[in-house]
Amino acid sequence: MRSRYGWALFLFFSLLAAQTLLRVGLFLKFGPSHQNFTGAFALVAGIGLARDCFVALLLTLPVLVWFWIVPDRWFSAKFHRVLFFTAAVFFWLVQLFLFAVEYFFFEEFMARFNTVAVDYLLYPHEVFINIWDSYPVGSVLIGCLVLAAAWSWLARRLAKNLWTENFPRRIRAVPLVASVALLAFLQTFIHLKAPAVSEDRVVNEIANNGTLSFVAAFWTRHLDFAAFYKTLPRDEAYRRARRLLNSPGDAFVGTGESLRRRIHGNPAQPRLNVVILLEESLGSEFWGSLGRKGASLTPELDRLAEREGILFTNIFASGNRTVRGMEGVLASFPPLPGDAIVKRDQSDNVETIARVLKRDGYNTLFLYGGRGIFDGMRSFTTRNGYDRFIEQKDFGHPTFTTIWGVCDEDLYARSIEEFRELAKSGQPFLGTILSVSNHKPYTYPAGRIAENPNKHRRAHAVKYADYSLGRFFEAARREAFWTNTIFVVVADHGARVYGSQAIPIQSYEIPLLILGPAAVSKPTRIGALGCSLDVAPTILGLIGRPYETMFFGRDLFEPGPGRVLLNHNRDIGLFDGETMAVLGLRKTVEFYKGDPRGAGLQRFSEAGGKEQELQQDAIALFQVADDLYRSGRYRVDAGSSDHALSGKRGGAGGGFARHSGK
């Protein structure tokens, strides 16, 4: 135990102990209180121990390799001692810091490192500064450094013969080979999918290991749907999808392996302008008009909804990331497992509401307060129907910025200016605005709302977002385009994930509010079940003109059964208002039943004929979406090349004539 291999053994057990302590802390802080504590923790600890052993051994393996390849004369040399000690301190500094980060990540997302963590790592500019502004990073780093140095000192004291005891190379190979063999053995019990020790999603997350969870998320960013999820025969999947998406009066165009269809409408209807305000994290939980307990955080929007809006009260986001909101709202596309199509590399052929309206002669504009490179937003929008993309660099002298971009007020003020100019052209326009202020670290200009911006509270940022929207609509009323524009306020996703289900649908509830005298004759509340995918078809239904589409959503003003298609990590699901079918990795299926707003959805195992039909519907919709996307066929005009250029005003009228022959 006092040799170099005693040092390696101490490293292994220290890693195991640290991971166990983290799991205990997560369970005590976030574990469910309604379960038997001892029984639940025994399951979590037992499953988690195997995963922790695997990771601890994997992290120890490089040390064993190093012990094997370094000659004894080098090993005892002074330069090697300094190098080895420095490397040990650095390793533990990083490892302990990651444990701290994982705790804070769990606190925010109620999950181990997942796709959100992978995405954050790919965009360090916004994310690392955001973390620095939101958490006591300096203090945590100092504490980790002290603990790392203390561990290295203690390990050296325990392994007194670390530098002096020599081993022949053949002897050094034994622990290395044994460790590799043990890793191979443990690997047979370790799967990418999170462990299922309970029906409670949070418990399963605690039983998982953060390193394995991160690797799984990174490895499965571009998933082969057929390899990981249940499928149907291709022709059956298309038949079922076409039946689900068919509406009275609409007509499919083309073969059975297409969703292209012609939507009925009146070509004499005026081409109304459309403004979509895609609001960052503005979930229904903040809206007094949507049942918030306690004081509402959205008094401006509540007032607008009550006096002059159409408020949909039963809408759910398709995911918990902005890119999921974009693909749902703009492209009416199901949230496939893996990356959202906004970030994928085959997204030059994607149907969007911007493409539909461009074919009808509209100018199109996307305004974003942050950097267009983030999550590939500029690339996706300008290649799929938007003539121009305005981003943070296009704001010469913003009055206030956060790490995520310019404040909502600046963004909305610029939007009013742009819409005013577009209205002067005589062509109708589509404007889409994506806000950023309602995001950690929750900073906003002082003096707008009563709350102190230096306190960095989510509730304060929500109130500021509401304040800014109120000012936007005040300004819009004074513009000539107010009377012939449909305004749509919709959240990209909810504020945070909570709940025990595999897909915690209650945390996905979002508002959908339609305003403007061109669309609203009297204030109305509509309880039709829907999701992000239904926003574009509903807007086009309000305009009332005929168009062709590939969309998976439906017009919420039309009668018919509602559905919610959603994604959480690597699970995808279909909810019909009573039952949710969840498709998971390794071709698994789970069923949940209940009321998302009441007692929540509860898992059940004995699925009858109705549940089996729901499962088949879910498989068909996601399988067809995957097939259309991968084959480049999710686009009405898939053979044309009308890619727009950022910053350049496009000839929307000419594009419409080219596609439609008019």
Image (cartoon, helix red, strand yellow):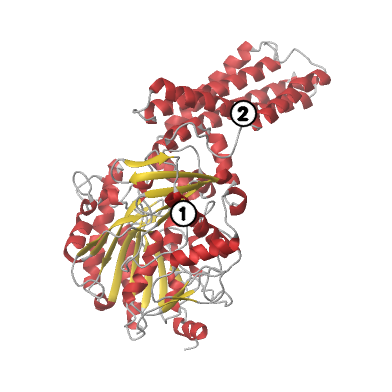
**One can see residue 236 in this view:** yes
Query: Label 2: few (<14), some or many (≥20) within 10 Å?
Result: many
Q: Which residue is mark 2?
A: 54
Q: Secondary structure at mark 2?
A: helix
- 164 relative to 418 in the view: left or right: right
Q: Position of residue 211 (x, y in %)?
A: 56, 35
Query: Looking at the image, can residue 331 be seen?
Result: no
Mark earlier in primary sequence (1, 2): 2
Q: Residue at x 57, y 27 (%)?
A: 52
Q: Which residue is mark 1?
A: 613
Q: Position of residue 476 (x, y in %)?
A: 25, 70
Residue drawn 41% across the image and 49% down it? 580
Image vertical order of residue 657 relative to residue 367, above or below: below
Image quarter hosting the N terminus? top right
The residue sitting at the left extreme is 307
Side of 145 relative to 482 (left or right): right
Task: From this view, report whether residue 388 is shown above or below residue 611.
Answer: below
Task: Work out whether 439 lies above or below 390.
Answer: above
For badge 1, the amino acid type reads Glu
